[in-house]
Amino acid sequence: MHLMYFTEQPMSAYPAQAGKDFGATALMFSNKHFDPVAGSRLYNEYIEHYKLAEEVGFDGIMLNEHHNAPFCMQAKCNVFASILAALTKKVKLVLLGNPLPLAENPVRLAEELAMIDMISRGRLVSGFVRGGGQEQLAAGVNPAFNRERFEEAHDLIIRTWTQEGPFRWEGTHYQHRVVNPWAVPLQKPHPRVWIPGVLSKETIIWAARQRYPYVALSTAIPATKKIWELYDSVAAETGYTAGPENRGYLQRCHVAETEEKAMANARQFMWMQGEFTGLAHPVWSTPSGYFSPSYRKAFVEFAVGRGVNPRAAAFEDQIRDQQIIAGTPKTVIPKLRRLLEETRPSIVGFWASDGFVSNADATTCIKLLGQEVLPAVREMGKELKLLSPFEAEAPVSIRESKGPAPAAA
Amino acid sequence: MTVISDAVWTTEEVKVCGVAVRLRKRGAGPPLFVLHHDIGTLESLPFYESLAQRFTVYLPSHPGYDGAERPAWLRSARDVAVIYQALLALLKVGPVNLVGLGFGGWIAAEMATMSPQAFRRVILVGAMGVKPTHGEILDQALLSYIAYARAGFKDQRAFDRLYGTDPSTPQLEQWDLNREMTFRIAWKPYMYNPALPHLLGGVRSRTLVVWGRADKVVPLECGEAYARAIPGSRLAVVEKAGHCVDMEQPDALVKLISEFTAGS
């Protein structure tokens, strides 16, 4: 198994009432509410959490990025990956991921990632995402070309990593007359690519066709099973058999010394009123062209307040469905077993704390996870034969499926 | 070319630049082309009916709008203008009167710059396309479909009469589809062409610029800028109207068009 530590890096020092009064905590919610003094403190606390996560035995640190919103302070995952490349020694740096469509220059991204891979001595896992709907607006990037840009930027980055330069790229959305970055990745053929997602079938299908592991972000177990049904069928069509090495899951899981404290802190997973990516204005989170046409009816109704949010669920429901797990190590371990037995992931991210959970409680949670939960999960993983892509020496992609697994050059 | 006729409108699909352009036609008299808003258009409007008493009204759907075929390669309002120039060449209807509404006004302005003397008259109504100096063109990406469509009206009762107080879900889907197409061709810079004010200096077609006094979508200063940029043009401001003068004050707009197109 590959067990990762994750935090959204919540900006818990913002005035929550101001967000409620405004009616949204993203995109147009003014950054006058950002306090850089608190921001400086929090960034440094998060660095300590990541160092502790390595110390207590996590295999990886999962990083992400979001923009214009307090639910996630990390505006550039490559910045934290760079810091951690130098500060940590063993953990994989799992970026889930760089939002490709927001990049105007994917070659620059390929260079940055190559630098991180070399500085970390080959510990980079380079996931890619489409970016949230409102982030297209935050970056001024056309939502109507989101998926086209995602796929083209991906193709350009992989080619930049695998083909000797110089070469020329004349694409639909990207044109580069000279592609020849000096820095290339340490891992060959290239760093592993994992694809996280929550809703879009198109992304699951795309990931399965590439033979990239897909990381389901806190979906309920029945929905997660449906994801694997789809992934496995596309894998079979593509000509390989998918297994646990293709499956990742991000579990919100808060552990404390007592049940009561754990449950109280777990409520902080709902600190954005249950919205995954901040209290969103429905129009900003679903710009026209961003979602596939099959969701058009649901989203136009949602956008004018006629339909229910297709993504949000109540805290009690999420506890019941195990989208959120909370308790002492003793009570969370059986729940994690259920997750592993029913959905068979080999990559598990632990989203440990959120919102206004104190630094002391967040630290205790990481320690308890490392000391008591991770060893139990590893044992279950062995018993259930949940081999991670590293343990299974899985090929990095369909293109490389006949070649060797990536290794430091 | 397929032609469907009902008692009032004739609808045909004309292949231009590889795109099936849906063209509706109605009435009798001198040819008058009407280019619709970014929100698309309702099938029928008092404005069209009134125009059809005096003109042969041609009403194309912009490619990708209101269910018309979407060319994946289309990237700018100027691309649409070229398609319409090709359409006019194909139809051989002679010098036409050209009316552009809002976003359609931008397309009409681009067309006018391409063939300076081709149009009998050009009427630009609340046209996008020129960057305001002081204000801003309203960003629909931040507004719901209903809020954006409503922003085009000074008097919300006029909106209610046409779309209903609570527009239907199919209407919302149509607006979403049209908005997506608008993003595809006018995302950045949003709703203007920096070169247009310069190119407008070459227009020789007689041009009337019309603006609703209470336009909250495209500031009135853009109307003034159009009138300054196009030689010999003038600006007529319609009171008690927002951006969608055609839907809010159809009689006033038809009167302006009729008077401006009368005579040689």
Image (spheres, coloured by chain):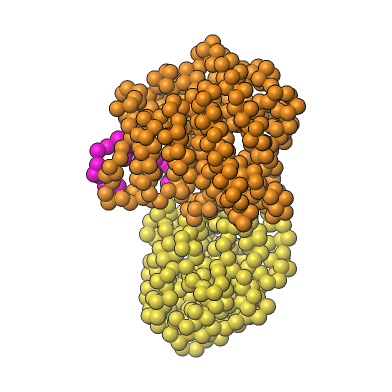
Chain colours: A orange, B yellow
**Residue A259: x percent and y percent?**
73, 24
Query: In the image, is residue B34 part of the stretch drawn in magenta?
Result: no
Figure quadrant of residue B230: bottom left
Above or below A132: residue A319: above
Q: Residue at x 69, y 50 (%)?
A: A15
Q: Position of residue A37 (x, y in %)?
A: 59, 49
Residue A106 falls left or right of residue B122:
left
Rendered residue at 43%/31% (across/down): A125
Instruction: Quadrant for the N terminus of chain B, please.
Output: bottom left
Q: Relative to the observer, which residue lies in front, A131 or B202?
A: A131
Q: Residue at x 55, y 69 (%)?
A: B136
The image quadrant of residue B112 is bottom left
Residue A207 vertical position relative to residue A21 in the rendered view, above or below: above
Task: Residue A160 in the image: state x and y as whole percent.
Answer: 31, 40
> Hey, which residue is sitting farthest right in the picture?
A260
Most foreground residue, B103 or A370 = A370
Residue at the image position 49 percent from the left and 79 percent from the top: B225
Is A292 placed left or right of B240 in the picture? left
Q: How many marks?
A: 0
Q: Which residues are magenta?
A: A149-169
The majority secondary structure of the magenta stretch comes to: helix
Place residue B200 in its image quadrant.
bottom left
On screen, residue A49 above or below B260: above
Can residue B173 be seen in the rendering of this structure?
no
- Give the farthest residue toward the top: A383
Can residue A42 be seen at all in this image of the molecule?
A: yes
- Classify residue A179 as left or right of residue B219: left
